[in-house]
């Protein structure tokens, strides 16, 4: 099976937020829940760079390690998903996540936050693929239709890549080799304990 | 605080506050239910607001067994021309898919394009016609609205004449809509018809057309991949045209290209540049001349190109030589060494392109700015080939098209102007009696006089009658798709909003016309008509690169909205000229057929080469997008093989001629039937020039030894007329039928019939047969005689912080332009005399954010976009903020130089702007001078996000050649609130 990953080429990202609204559109994510966002460093200064961030679907995901009800699972494609039926909204995963990915529909302590929500790599949840029940809890399941996450598919500058680890790493390597610069695969060391040698 | 940039994580507080007064409760609640919370936490639901039920709620996924169809349309948020691929099931738009086959966007979108589906969900749309009754918004029926509006229009016309009704159309309409709107103006009997191009690229159209023939982007977004040097001066495409960055950045990477951003702000685009040049706002001409100074000094100019294809270099050279590095730095702040480096790259690492947008155009010197840019391109021979050219990024999805189809105050469709010949041409195309058309106007002279620019509608409404050069003041505004808050001097416009006898706003949203009019004290005689978005209509749109794309109707108009075309038909019927106006246009259930309108345009648009783009060809291009090569834009296979995508105009001859379109203007390396061309001799064939000794000499304006590939005339030549064909012996190539049409057009002197008015298309066909360009082969003009400044001259902004420079570089004297006085000189002088720059020491500029567009009411009503930018703000430099005790994220009052204007906004303290410069986005509205106007909108139609408009603070200043406003440079003061 493929090992699916995200890769954001920070030298291409222009913070246009297409990834953010594509995600909202595809899954009808409500106001206040942000499965994906763009973070800008050195804002307004020389060297300003932006990175699009969401759940990175980590190897040995720390969210899964701390979950008291064991609601996380990793698919055969290495996508980290969770069950909203099991989630108790404790918020531990939010503290464990190095990327700030878990989102909650309500502000509050412990159980009153509501069911955690996060990026599913456009691949739904435990319910049958493409079912209404799956859509209502987790959003669309593009992977099951043979499509990749919409955020990356719609990226304005092809900065955000999603897909098989080897394939996207190769695209990035070739890009860096051709243009002669690259600030590395952002977040890969943390998420996957590896980087792309360029 | 929730302004752009780094602080998005802190969003929570604001959103929960917003949810309480919006009907977002619906989504939040349904999401909680979906999330499984309802089962376990019913107790908490009681605290949530009750949601209204939305009709036809059938979101994704499609119901089991229901068919899902794909419809393709065009994104409505900028002029890159991204294809939108919509999945539709049971009449509901259930999803967007990437448009991989589009040779323009290749699947990509920006935040706006990726969220257009929200527009037809319509929670904050205007849902039915409304009327202001004693200050209250009241629901009415369509027929009542049309009847009352029609009666009032007739009464105003009776009393004050046709010119007292101002028809403000839109770049959001399709070509067919914009064309029909202009035609409507002609049949009503006024030239007061305008649209967003006035405040967008009117100065480009005038300046560039006056240089080399047509006022449009010469190349295309994808062609920028071929450039070795890109200068982006006065544009921030990373936010305004994000998908274009795909091509700019890939070009940068593949060619190791120089990307130079020249801008007062270190923009998101500048963050990806190889060099950033900061200039003082309003000093583009000195910087451009500064580059030319280095180019001439070092002999980097393209001498052969200038000799063959440029007129007036010696005159221009005198001005270029004035701008030595010391003076350039004194005026603009740009160091000479940096400018020399940039000039060298542009002149020697070719091909080079110059990209611009509102940063150059929105000035009192806008026309001169773009002229200077053209001169830099001409000087270095960077026009007419791949990777070169003036890549002028247009703003609205169809602002190029709406301009081409003449939704304008100075011309009939397709740049024919307003002269008698133009009216006679269109009366032939429309098969309408010329005398009847003339009878609709006050007089023949009135019919041939340019109208009032939209920037000054309120001046035309409130100035003393004797200062408005028409029968009466503007008494009624019909606004179909244009913001009010994108026009400068809002405090003055409030007086106009109150004074009007009738105000009609036809739009998907009530817009700030509604909230500001009520705020101004208006209580009656105002109507809001719900118009469908372009996703609910079909028709052609023109992207910035002059390519036409046919958009399908994705879903039927929602609620009681109507298509633009239908509204025009209903009103024309009420006013009694529908039979004449729709003589050759089929109307089905009150909806004029878009295809028929395009065919009528095809028949009359030989001047601009819109004659070959039949609806059938355009639809075929959309259906076979995958056949087109992204880099060349040419179909390599399939039914459109050989065509350029979207048949970018000029697409010569009738559709049967099968001209492939012109991807790059003025490219002599290709034969004209392959998309080649040359500069257009539009200003005569020769000109009498005075020599120093007092004698005169006639100088040719035709090209000298340069011609497009395979041309049978190996030199410059004038535009084609029957007389020219006869002289060449080519008139024998005309068929009898063509000759009959020509003879009918001008029975007395058929020889005078030209390529642009020959409705048979025969003259064009014959010229093309001999590989000649129908419009002739001339020189581009560095000296654009006829313009206010034939050779661009630096002029300080009306409100200049550099009072020491105003005496040397004053604005032009006061004059009467476009029926109104332009008192810029007096205002500039008064500002200096009163010491305005002392009390208002900070330069204020304005611009775009990626999430919003234009006046922003539509995009601020889109919940997926509104969430990303919840507060109006002002960017202020770190040291200016420190001097004033202003904290990042804190409230500030911005005060302006006119009308004691003020605006309460949040401060974004940043080094993005230089010291002494502040910047505001222009998309906000719904607040006025500290007051929240949410209650002034009809209930449930207020945008999610409201804020102060930048144009509350902007001030006087108009380009003498076009009436362009000055939102890019004014003065302000900022204080902590």
Image: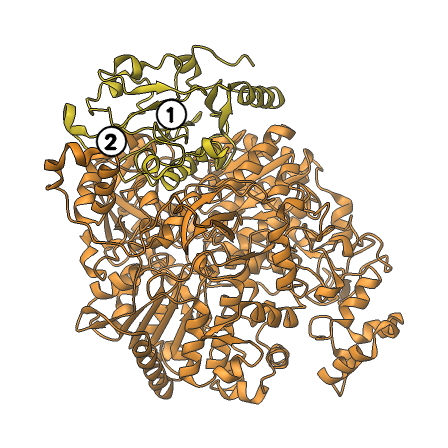
The N terminus of chain B appears in which quarter of the rendering? top left
Q: Is residue B304 above or below residue B658?
A: above
The secondary element bearing badge 1 is classed as strand
Q: Residue at x 74, y 51 (%)?
A: B642
Is residue B323 visible to us here?
no
Of circles 2 and 1, the one toward us is: 2
The C terminus of chain B appears in which quarter of the rendering? top left
Which residue bears the numbered disc 1? A41
Q: Residue at x 68, y 38 (%)?
A: B351
Is residue B195 visible to us here?
yes
Q: Quadrant of residue A35?
A: top left
Q: Is residue A144 above or below residue B18?
A: above
Give the chain coloured orange.
B
Which residue bears the numbered disc 2? B10
Give left or right: position of B843 versus B96: left
Q: Quadrant of residue B473?
A: bottom left
Q: Which chain does tag 2 point to?
A: B
**B519 or B802: nearer the eye?**
B519
By what rule are the colours in the image chosen? by chain
Give left or right: position of B399 versus B860: right
């Amino acid at each position: 099976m493929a090992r699916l990953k995200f890769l954001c080429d920070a030298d291409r990202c222009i913070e246009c937020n297409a990834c953010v609204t594509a995600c909202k559109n595809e899954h009808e994510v409500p106001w206040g829940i942000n499965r994906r966002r763009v973070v800008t460093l050195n804002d307004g200064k020389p060297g300003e760079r932006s990175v699009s961030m969401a759940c990175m679907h980590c190897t040995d995901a720390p969210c899964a390690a701390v979950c008291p009800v064991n609601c996380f699972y990793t698919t055969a494609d290495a996508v980290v998903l969770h069950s909203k039926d099991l989630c108790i909204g404790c918020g531990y995963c939010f503290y464990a996540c190095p990327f700030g990915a878990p989102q909650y529909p309500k502000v509050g302590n412990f159980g009153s936050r509501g069911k955690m929500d996060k990026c599913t790599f456009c691949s739904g949840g435990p319910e049958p693929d493409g079912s209404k029940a799956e859509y209502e809890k987790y959003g669309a399941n593009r992977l099951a239709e043979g499509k990749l996450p919409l955020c990356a598919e719609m990226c304005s500058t092809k900065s955000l890549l999603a897909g098989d680890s080897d394939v996207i790493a190769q695209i990035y390597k070739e890009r860096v080799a051709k243009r002669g610069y690259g600030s590395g695969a952002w977040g890969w060391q943390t998420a996957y304990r590896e980087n792309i040698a360029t | 605080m929730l302004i752009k940039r780094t602080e998005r994580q802190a969003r929570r507080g604001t959103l929960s506050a917003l949810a309480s007064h919006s009907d977002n409760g619906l989504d939040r609640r349904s999401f909680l239910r979906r999330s499984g919370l309802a089962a376990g936490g019913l107790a908490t639901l009681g605290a949530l607001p009750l949601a209204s039920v939305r009709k036809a709620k059938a979101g994704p996924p499609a119901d089991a067994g229901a068919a899902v169809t794909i419809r393709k349309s065009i994104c409505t948020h900028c002029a890159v021309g991204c294809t939108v691929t919509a999945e539709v099931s049971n009449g509901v738009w259930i999803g967007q898919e990437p448009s991989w086959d589009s040779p323009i966007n290749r699947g990509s979108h920006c935040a706006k394009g990726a969220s257009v589906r929200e527009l037809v969900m319509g929670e904050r749309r205007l849902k039915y016609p409304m009327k202001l009754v004693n200050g209250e918004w009241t629901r009415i029926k369509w027929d009542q609205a049309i009847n009352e509006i029609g009666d009032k229009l007739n009464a105003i016309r009776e009393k004050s004449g046709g010119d007292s009704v101002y028809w403000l159309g839109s770049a959001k309409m399709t070509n067919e809509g914009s064309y029909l709107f202009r035609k409507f103006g002609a049949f009503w009997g006024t030239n007061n018809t305008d649209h967003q191009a006035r405040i967008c690229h009117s100065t480009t159209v005038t300046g560039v057309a006056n240089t080399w023939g047509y006022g449009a982007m010469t190349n295309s977004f994808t062609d920028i991949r071929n450039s070795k040097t890109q200068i982006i001066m006065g544009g921030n495409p990373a936010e305004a045209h994000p998908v274009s960055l795909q091509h700019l950045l890939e070009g940068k990477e593949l060619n190791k290209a120089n990307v130079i951003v020249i801008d007062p702000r270190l923009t998101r685009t500048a963050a990806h540049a190889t060099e950033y040049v900061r200039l003082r706002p309003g000093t583009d001409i000195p910087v451009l001349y500064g580059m030319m100074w280095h180019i001439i000094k070092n002999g980097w100019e393209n001498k052969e190109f200038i000799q063959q294809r440029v007129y007036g270099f010696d005159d221009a050279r005198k001005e270029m030589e004035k701008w030595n590095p010391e003076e350039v730095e004194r005026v603009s702040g740009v160091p000479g060494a940096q400018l020399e480096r940039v000039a060298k790259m542009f002149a020697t690492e070719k091909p080079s392109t110059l990209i611009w947008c509102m940063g150059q155009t929105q000035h009192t010197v806008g026309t001169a700015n773009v002229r200077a840019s053209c001169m830099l391109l001409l000087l270095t021979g960077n026009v007419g080939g791949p990777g070169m050219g003036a890549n002028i990024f247009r703003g609205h999805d169809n602002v190029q098209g709406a301009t081409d189809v003449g939704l304008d105050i100075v011309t009939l469709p397709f740049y024919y102007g307003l002269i008698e010949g133009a009216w006679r041409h269109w009366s032939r195309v429309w098969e309408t009696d010329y005398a009847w058309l003339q009878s609709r106007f006050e007089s023949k002279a009135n019919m041939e006089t340019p109208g009032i620019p939209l920037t000054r509608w309120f001046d035309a409404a409130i100035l003393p009658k004797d200062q408005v050069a028409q029968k009466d003041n503007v008494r009624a505004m019909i606004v179909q798709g244009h913001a009010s808050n994108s026009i400068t001097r809002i405090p003055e416009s409030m007086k106009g909003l109150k004074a009007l006898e009738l105000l009609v706003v036809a739009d998907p949203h009530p817009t700030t016309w509604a909230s500001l009019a009520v705020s101004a004290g208006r209580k009656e005689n105002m109507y809001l008509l719900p118009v469908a978005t372009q996703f609910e209509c079909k028709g052609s749109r023109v992207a910035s690169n002059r390519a036409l794309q046919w958009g399908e109707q994705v879903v039927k108009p929602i609620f009681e909205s109507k298509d633009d075309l239908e509204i025009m038909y209903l009103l024309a019927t009420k006013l009694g000229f529908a039979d004449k106006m729709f003589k050759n246009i089929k109307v089905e259930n009150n909806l004029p057929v878009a295809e028929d309108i395009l065919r009528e345009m095809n028949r009359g648009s030989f001047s601009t080469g819109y004659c070959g783009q039949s609806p059938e060809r355009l639809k075929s291009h959309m259906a076979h997008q995958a056949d087109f090569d992204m880099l060349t834009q040419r179909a390599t296979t399939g039914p459109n093989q050989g065509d350029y995508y979207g048949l970018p105009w000029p697409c010569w001859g009738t559709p049967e001629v099968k001209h492939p379109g012109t991807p790059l203007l003025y490219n002599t390396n290709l034969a004209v039937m392959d998309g080649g061309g040359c500069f257009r001799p539009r200003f005569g064939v020769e000109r009498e020039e005075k020599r120093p000794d007092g004698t005169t000499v006639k100088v040719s304006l035709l090209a000298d030894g340069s011609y497009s590939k395979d041309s049978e005339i190996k030199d410059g030549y004038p535009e084609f007329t029957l007389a020219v064909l006869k002289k060449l012996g080519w008139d024998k190539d005309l068929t009898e039928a063509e000759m009959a049409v020509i003879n009918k057009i001008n029975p007395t002197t058929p020889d005078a019939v030209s390529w642009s008015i020959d409705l048979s298309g025969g003259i064009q066909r014959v010229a093309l047969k001999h590989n000649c360009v129908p419009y002739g082969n001339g020189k581009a003009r560095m000296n654009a005689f006829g313009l206010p400044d034939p050779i661009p001259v630096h002029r300080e902004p009306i409100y200049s912080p550099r009072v020491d420079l105003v005496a040397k570089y004053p604005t032009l004297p006061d004059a009467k332009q476009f029926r109104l006085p332009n008192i810029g000189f007096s205002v500039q002088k008064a500002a200096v005399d009163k010491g305005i720059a002392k009390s208002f020491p900070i330069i204020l500029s304005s611009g775009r954010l990626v999430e919003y567009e234009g006046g922003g009411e539509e995009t601020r009503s889109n919940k997926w976009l509104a969430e990303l930018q919840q507060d109006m703000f002002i960017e202020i430099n770190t040291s200016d903020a420190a001097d004033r005790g202003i904290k990042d994220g804190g409230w500030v009052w911005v005060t302006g130089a006119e009308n004691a204007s003020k605006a309460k906004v949040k401060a974004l303290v940043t080094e993005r702007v230089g010291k002494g410069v502040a910047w505001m986005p222009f998309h906000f509205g719904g607040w006025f001078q500290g007051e929240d106007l949410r209650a002034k909108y009809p209930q449930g139609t207020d945008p999610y996000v409201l804020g102060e408009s930048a144009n509350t603070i902007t001030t006087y200043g108009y380009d003498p050649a076009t009436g362009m406003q000055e939102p890019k440079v004014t003065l302000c003061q900022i204080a902590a609130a």
